[in-house]
Each structure stands twice: as structure tokens, then as C-alpha cells.
Amino acid sequence: MATTRKLLTLAMVRQGENILLGFKKKGFGQGKWNGFGGKVEMGETICQATIRELEEESGLIAKAMDKVAILEFEFLNDPVILEVHVYDIVKYEGEPIESDEMVPQWFPVNDIPYEKMWLDDLIWYPEYLKGSKFKAYFLYEGFDKILKHSISPVQELPL
Ligand SMILES: CNc1ncnc2c1ncn2[C@@H]1O[C@H](COP(=O)(O)OP(=O)(O)OP(=O)(O)O)[C@@H](O)[C@H]1O
């Protein structure tokens, strides 16, 4: 089966010992806490999409960001591969506000609500929180089971 790739963004907002997550009210990942992001649209760079989605979903305006990871998700019997570009938002303006997609809330980094998040988050958040840059791959069966995964540190990530 020929595969197609979908480019997605994920913005991580961390302030010292706290991390900002959004509760997804609708769409893919509904009912889960996650960072802020979505699909890269036609004619847009991954960076531009990251900034746009962060503002649409949280009200925050990114002023400086750093790519920290590329995550690949495959779902058994599904030809679509999700390629998620993860950015650490180093500097931003504004205050978190609820949007029609997300309810933002700060969590202490030692009390992340993993039980209400994607299973893969439990695997890669600790790497992100350590400050590493990495690439990771996950093969899901349905949405609640990971059949296989790999995670490898990298020195640099392509923009
Ligand atoms: C499978 N394991 C996963 N683990 C962690 N995060 C995941 C994820 N799979 C997708 N994500 C993120 O979830 C958001 C979906 O966004 P999604 O609603 O599809 O995009 P967008 O807002 O453009 O959609 P609509 O405009 O509603 O169609 C987006 O940030 C994307 O990076």
C-alpha cells in the first residue's frame, strides 16, 4: 500500500516547573490533553503553521522557538503516516485563553495527566523535559495500543 505523509505541528510551552497543555474539545485527539498544533496548510512553512496553530488554539503568540523533535506515527492498516514537528516555545506574548478547540491549563511537570493523553506522550515527554532533541517512531494498533516504537537522540533537526 502506498503511504502518504501528513505534516503536523506541536507547540510545547514550558515555564520552569510548569507546562501548558490544552484539553482538546473536538477533532483528532478529542478528550485528551496535548500541546497545541495541527496540520500544515498549503503554501505555509512548518514554522508558520506552528505559530498559527499555537495562536488559534491557545491565544499565545510565539516569539522564539526551537525544534526539539520529529515524531512519526503509523497506524496499522492505515496508509497515512503522521509526521509531527515538535517545537519548544522559548518566548511568547499573551496569556492563555480558551478557544473553540482547546481549554488551556498549566500543569506541574511532575504531575502531567498522562492517563488522559496519547500513550506515546508517556514515552517521549520525559526526553523532551530533559532537554534532549530526538526522533521517534510509533506504530499504533487503533488509538490505545502501541505495537512498537523507537526513540533516538539527534544533534540537529532539519528546520
Ligand atoms: C498519535 N499520537 C499523537 N501524539 C501526540 N500528539 C498527536 C498525536 N497525533 C496527532 N497529534 C497532535 O494532535 C493535533 C492534531 O491536530 P488536528 O486536529 O488534526 O489538526 P487541525 O487543528 O489542523 O485539524 P482541523 O482543523 O480540526 O481539521 C496536532 O497538534 C498533532 O501534532
Image: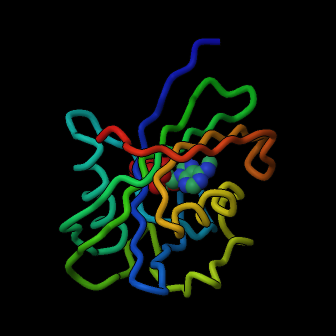
Q: Is residue 92 left or right of residue 150?
A: left
* Residue 2 in picture, x, y percent from top left: 58, 12
**Which residue ends up furthest to the front in the rendered image?**
155
Up-down relation of residue 79 to residue 94 (above or below):
above
Query: Which residue is painted at 67% across and 54% down in the image?
Result: 120
Query: Which residue is painted at 65% across and 12% down in the image?
Result: 1
Q: Quadrant of residue 97?
A: bottom left
* Residue 17 in picture, x, y percent from top left: 48, 86
Query: Which residue is painted at 45% across and 78% down in the image?
Result: 20
Residue 25 visible in image = no
Q: Quadrant of residue 50?
A: bottom left
Residue 52 visible in image = yes
Q: Is residue 46 left or right of residue 79?
A: left
Q: Nearer the viewer, residue 125 or 24?
A: 125
Up-down relation of residue 105 to residue 2 (above or below):
below
Query: Which residue is painted at 59% across and 64% down in the image?
Result: 125
* Residue 100 in picture, x, y percent from top left: 41, 70
Up-down relation of residue 50 to residue 15 (above or below):
above
Q: Quadrant of the C terminus?
A: top left
Total marks placed = 0
* Residue 11 in picture, x, y percent from top left: 39, 61
Specify how the rendered protein is coloured.
Answer: rainbow
